[in-house]
Amino acid sequence: MPSQGVTPAGPPRRRFRWSSGLFVSSAVGWAGFILLWYVLIWAGVVKEHYLPPPHEVVKALVEGLLPGGDMRRHVLPSLRRSLVGFGLGIVIGVTLGIAIGWFKPFERIIDSVLQFFRQLSALALFPVFLLFFGLGEPSKYAIVTWAALWPILLTTIAAVKGVEKLQIDAAKSMGANSWFIFTKVVLPASIPRILPGIRLGGAYAITVLVAAEMVGAPAGLGIFTLTMQQTFRIPQMYAGILLLGLLGLAVNYLLVLVERRLTGWQEGITNG
């Protein structure tokens, strides 16, 4: 007779094997990338003046972040701008996306306007942001918010509209009102589909930050990287680029953890 109350060990083992395999695959990918970098330099395909070896870039990164390093003071301004703009993008994108996805008349009114503005990149609107907000921090926040907004907004609209009608009809058949259906059916079903858009918005917030900081910013990794290029301090320039990439990875992995935390129940249903 099988014992009761014993949790199957299969799913955790599968998750461990999957995580281990992913780590090994990522390590192999990075090792191949670094090896190719060295080969391009050693073979003379790229001059070392324009592409320093990886160890020199890492050295410049470490030295720049140590106390007294010239990169250190640029990190916090960039983090602040990206996080504020990203946060505003989440608030505006999720709120507006839910409203558009849930209220059909509102969607019909705003859809053509939405389709027009989604074609305009943040960089194309940068002169407008500068005109309205000047060279100070508000223009930086505005351009990052605009870049992060669109993937969040569009995925939220699709998520709300994509809730199965069968679920809504089942709730209605049990006498549920619109507020109950919205809060207990539509929102929980939409969250797993909204989160990938938030992750993409986080990536866009980091990407556009560089361009935003290259105009009128007293400090930031974007202006730091541009200054290093103009003064031909190439290892430091690549160190700034490397740090931006690492910050983007950190934001992405943090959002992945949040996504797993909020949607872990789905895995349990699937494994069950």
Image (cartoon, rainbow, N blue to C red):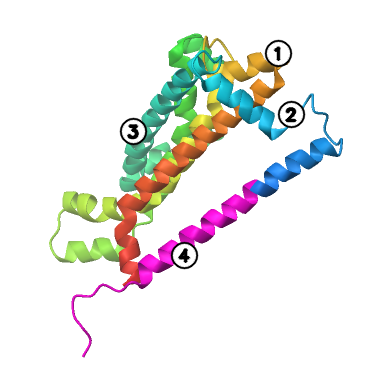
Left or right side of 122 for 95: left
Q: Which mark is residue 230?
A: 1
Residue type at mark 4 is: Arg
Residue type at mark 3 is: Val
Between tags 4 and 1, which lies in front?
Answer: 4
The answer to the question of whether label 2 and label 1 lie on touching residues, with beta carbons closer than 8 A, is: no
| Residue indicated by mark 4 | 17
The residue carrying pointer 2 sits among few (fewer than 14), some (14 to 19) or many (20 or more) residues within 10 Å by Cα, namely some
Upstream in sequence: badge 4 or badge 3? 4
Q: How far apart are marks 4 and 1 (CA)?
A: 47 Å
The answer to the question of whether label 4 and label 3 lie on touching residues, with beta carbons closer than 8 A, is: no
Judging from the image, what secondary structure is the residue with disc 2 in? loop
Residue type at mark 2 is: Pro
Between tags 1 and 3, which lies in front?
Answer: 1
Q: What residue sits 82% from the left and 33% below the top?
A: 46
Q: Identify the main secondary structure in magenta.
A: helix
Q: What residue sits 17% from the left and 52% below the top?
A: 180
Between tags 3 and 2, which lies in front?
Answer: 2
Residue 205, position as x, y percentages in the image? 49, 31
| Residue indicated by mark 3 | 91
Q: How far apart are marks 4 and 3 (CA)?
A: 37 Å
Q: Can residue 112 be seen from the camera position used here? A: no
Left or right side of 236 for 106: left
Judging from the image, what secondary structure is the residue with disc 3 in? helix
Q: What stretch is highlighted in magenta?
A: 1-30
Upstream in sequence: badge 2 or badge 4? 4
Q: How far apart are marks 2 and 4 (CA)?
A: 37 Å
